[in-house]
Image (spheres, rainbow, N blue to C red):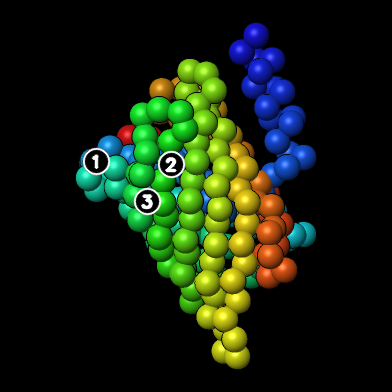
Amino acid sequence: MKKLKLALIVLFFPAMAFCQVFNTASTLAPGKFSLGVNPVVYDNDFGLFLHGGVGIKPGVDLAMRYGFLEGEDYFGADIEWRLLGGGKPGISLITGAHKYWRGGLDLGLNISFPITSGVSLYTGLDMDINFWPDNTIVPVWLPVGVEIPLKSNISFMFEAEIPLSDEARSIFGGGLAFYF
């Protein structure tokens, strides 16, 4: 039965999926670490992202990511602040910055809905403020994702970012997250 549920989730989410948040509303406990890898499709381009995170204090973690997309390096860092946890739903706020072609700021709101024994659906709002030489653009997405634990310290994550503004592009990805 578990394999059937997993197969249905994996088959269902490709129809909706894109990847930049790659994160539920849960924060890492102080001193705990995470590493992740996820290939992405950004419109019609393929890329790869590597993620790392560390719990700073209860309800706060720091994440860093490196990506390679469209022949350009992506570097980003953010702090996630848990606003509501331990129940249904969990809610967190993400603030950060990135460099991809030019610099930008990141703002996100994650909402996680635990389904069963570790499986969580998550959504929210993801916004960038990108500073270009002649103007500033603000792409906005609706992330939709799922985290499925494979072992006690490994999860499979699958995510779609649905564009909500003209500046946003479709993002689709999935990968593994390792927790230490």
Q: Is residue 50 visible?
A: no
Q: Which residue is mark 2?
A: 91
Relative to 131, is 72 above or below?
above
Q: Are marks 2 and 1 in contact (CB under 8 Å)?
A: no
Q: Which of the numbered marks, if any, corresponds to residue 97?
A: none
Q: Nearer the viewer, residue 57 or 176?
A: 57
* The N terminus - image quarter: top right
Task: Please tell me in which quadrant of the rendered image residue 2 appears.
Answer: top right
Crowding at mark 1 (Cα within 10 Å: few <14, some 14-19, many 20+)? few
Whichever of labels 2 and 1 marks the residue nearer the N terminus, that label is 1
Q: Residue at x 63, y 51 (%)?
A: 142
Mark 3 and mark 2: span between their CA atoms?
10 Å
Q: Which residue is mark 3?
A: 80
**Residue 143, image x, y percentages:** 60, 48
Q: Which of the numbered marks, if any, corresponds to residue 58?
A: 1
**Residue 85, image x, y percentages:** 36, 34
Relative to 131, is 139 above or below?
above
Q: Residue at x 70, y 36 (%)?
A: 13
Whether residue 41 sits left or right of residue 103 in the image: it is right
Mark 1 and mark 3: span between their CA atoms?
11 Å
Relative to 37, is 87 above or below?
above
Whichever of labels 1 and 3 marks the residue nearer the N terminus, that label is 1
Task: Name the residue type under label 3.
Answer: Glu
Task: Name the residue type under label 1.
Answer: Pro
Q: Residue at x 52, y 31 (%)?
A: 113
**Residue 82, image x, y percentages:** 35, 44
Q: Residue at x 29, y 47 (%)?
A: 60
Q: Secondary structure at mark 3?
A: strand
Relative to 166, is 134 above or below?
below
Task: Name the residue type under label 2.
Answer: Ile
Whether residue 63 sits left or right of residue 145 in the image: it is left
